[in-house]
Amino acid sequence: MTERSFKELFDTAYGSASAQKTARASDMRAMQESATITKALCHPEYEYLQIGQSIEGKCLAFFLDIRGFTKLCFVYRNEVLLWILQALTEACVKSIAQFGGHTLEFTGDGVMAVFGDSKTQPENASLSGLHCTAFLMKGVRDIVNPRLKAGGTDPIRIAIGMEFGDVLWSRIGVLATSQVKPISEVTFLAGKLSTSKYTDSWEVKVGENLAEWIPEEFKEKAKRYEFVLGEKTHTHELYLFKWQKFGDAYQANADGLRKRLLARRLGPTLLSAARTVQTDGAARSFPRPLKDQPFF
């Protein structure tokens, strides 16, 4: 399938959104009667899960955080705000799908997605997530923001958090009010990393598992994630992903970069959980330390 540029995706989405008309309250009944059922956000491989069921898997967890959108509310009419938000959301969802990912959730000011399934090799899922990240960061910066600036307002900013590893796919909720989610320290950490507390605008921060796939010239050591629980200190190494340099290298020699990443096979510690450091200096395994500080 031919890769579509971010400009093409955003232009198409914005054109469709701006062509739609706002319905009146009196139109609601007719809209309800003619409405078609839309597919819920979910990973297609796990949507069959019922409440109480779960299955183990591996994936790259991806969180994109949008910042600065509130300012637009004081500049544009509500209709225009909707067009921008719909176009940006649609472009993100289609970009994620274009690189083999699945959008799971709209997080209020961003998007949660995963890359990988039972048929995809871990290194391919990691490469897809990294490629999509560089694609989106560049697209928002070079396509969306110049249009906002031309409209007389400040540009938006984005940041992304990612990690790779073992997850437990489960359906969470009650009866029809439920959602399939990947439960793991991997998703909780990626969600935290996308926030302004951990990552500045236009930065991408990744955990140590995903960093194993990234060649040295495309990553930089960052301050580790650390917290104390009881008498133990739990740590997880973090890295800044140099998305622009990676994107340029991918454009210049996609096959060469792909081969380099695919050659970085899983090591014995790649999917290990965050390390636990005991106060007496002895170390032991701790399966899911970040569950004690969940993202949601």
Image (spheres, rainbow, N blue to C red):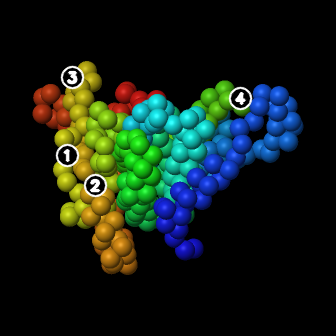
Q: Mark 3 is on which residue type?
A: Glu
Residue drawn at 20 percent across, 64 percent down: 217
The CA span between labels 4 and 2 is 40 Å
Q: Mark 2 is on which residue type?
A: Phe
Q: Residues within 10 Å of mark 1 (few under 14, many from 20)?
A: some
Answer with mark 2 or mark 3, whichever residue precedes in sequence: 3
Image quarter of the N terminus: bottom right
Query: Which SS class for mark 4?
Result: loop
Answer with mark 1 or mark 4, whichever residue precedes in sequence: 4
Q: Does the residue at mark 1 contact the one at mark 4 (Cβ under 8 Å)?
A: no
Q: Which residue corresponds to mark 1?
A: 222
The CA span between labels 2 and 1 is 10 Å
Q: Mark 4 is on which residue type?
A: Leu
- Which is more toward the observer, 230 or 31? 31
The CA span between labels 2 and 3 is 32 Å
The CA span between labels 3 and 4 is 40 Å
Residue 188 makes an appearance in the image: no
Give residue 124's quadrant in the image.
Answer: bottom left
The image position of residue 218, as x and y in percent, is 24, 61
The image position of residue 64, as x and y in percent, is 42, 45
Q: Which residue corresponds to mark 3?
A: 231
Answer with mark 3 or mark 1, whichever residue precedes in sequence: 1
Residue drawn at 19 percent across, 34 percent down: 277
Answer with mark 2 or mark 1, whichever residue precedes in sequence: 1
- Which is more toward the observer, 194 or 172? 194
Q: Nearer the viewer, mark 3 or mark 4?
A: 4
Q: Which residue corresponds to mark 2?
A: 241
